[in-house]
Image (cartoon, helix red, strand yellow):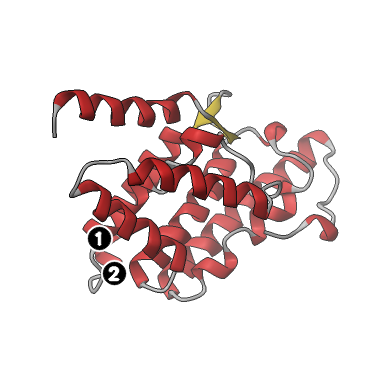
Amino acid sequence: MAPERLFEILAVAERLKCTPRHSWTSTGRRESVAEHCWRLTLMALLVADEFPGLCIDRVVRMCLIHDLGEAFTGDIPAFEKQAADEAREAELLSGWVSSLPEPLRSEWQSLFAEMEALETPEAKLCKALDKLEAVIQHNEADIATWLPLEYGLNITYGAGQVAWSDYLQRLKEAANAASLRKIADARMKNGIEEPRSDTAGE
């Protein structure tokens, strides 16, 4: 790949360093999309031994690029994202990927199509880890950064995506336990009310 073309692609990716997510770090600043993608990719490497039949290299590639559409649209929290938002992101991302040189174009088109179809275990693992990483990050942040709806959402978020794997279910259960401890501790210290059941959902 020519240096100039490489720099152009990296410039688009660099936007993710500057794009905040609806998550806060343990030090009290907004997390960037790039940081989420990096740790999601690290998670895939860390759990690789639990999925010996999967192509973890492909999962890693999915994790690295899965949020590139947000370089064009910014991050929209899952509980606010509408079908129109998803369609716009997909259109802008597809147009950009179509402009990439081969063989990168074909490879990324294949990866994005696989993630969209969500039929292979590799795509399912990427999706599940994506959800779990967000829950873990919320657990690491000060609970003062949580919206009221997130007291229930942190428990239910990703439940459907982990259901296909016993190991992922165990991870989700452990993350849920951490969420519940965090909520209980905050309620004791600060008088935070019990989460309302009607705020739960994905």
* Image side of residue 69 versus residue 7, left or right: right
Of 115 and 183, the residue lying toward us: 115
SS under mark 2: loop
**Residue sitting at 23 percent across and 71 percent down?**
52
Say which quarter of the image contains residue 153.
Answer: bottom right
Q: Badge 1: few (under 14), some or many (20 or more) residues near its Cα, within 10 Å?
A: some
CA separation in Å, label 1 and label 2: 8 Å
Residue 109 in sight from this viewpoint: yes
Evaluate if marks 1 and 2 touch, with contact meaning CB atoms under 8 Å apart: yes
**Residue sitting at 44 percent across and 31 percent down?**
16
Badge 2 amino acid: Phe
Say which quarter of the image contains residue 20.
Answer: top right
Provide residue 10's location: percent of width, then percent of height: 30, 28
Residue 44 in sight from this viewpoint: no
Badge 1 amino acid: Ile
Quadrant assignment for the N terminus: top left
* Image side of residue 71 versus residue 13, left or right: right
SS under mark 1: helix
Residue linked to disc 1: 56
Vertical comparison of 11 with 105: above or below: above
* Image side of residue 44 versus residue 165, left or right: left
- The number of discs equals 2
Of 80 and 134, the residue lying toward us: 80
**Residue sitting at 71 percent across and 32 percent down?**
144
Sequence-wise first label, 1 or 2: 2
Q: Badge 2: few (under 14), some or many (20 or more) residues near its Cα, within 10 Å?
A: some
Residue 68 tag number: none
Quadrant assignment for the C terminus: bottom right
Of 75 and 54, the residue lying toward us: 75
Of badges 1 and 2, the one in the foreground is 1
Residue linked to disc 2: 51
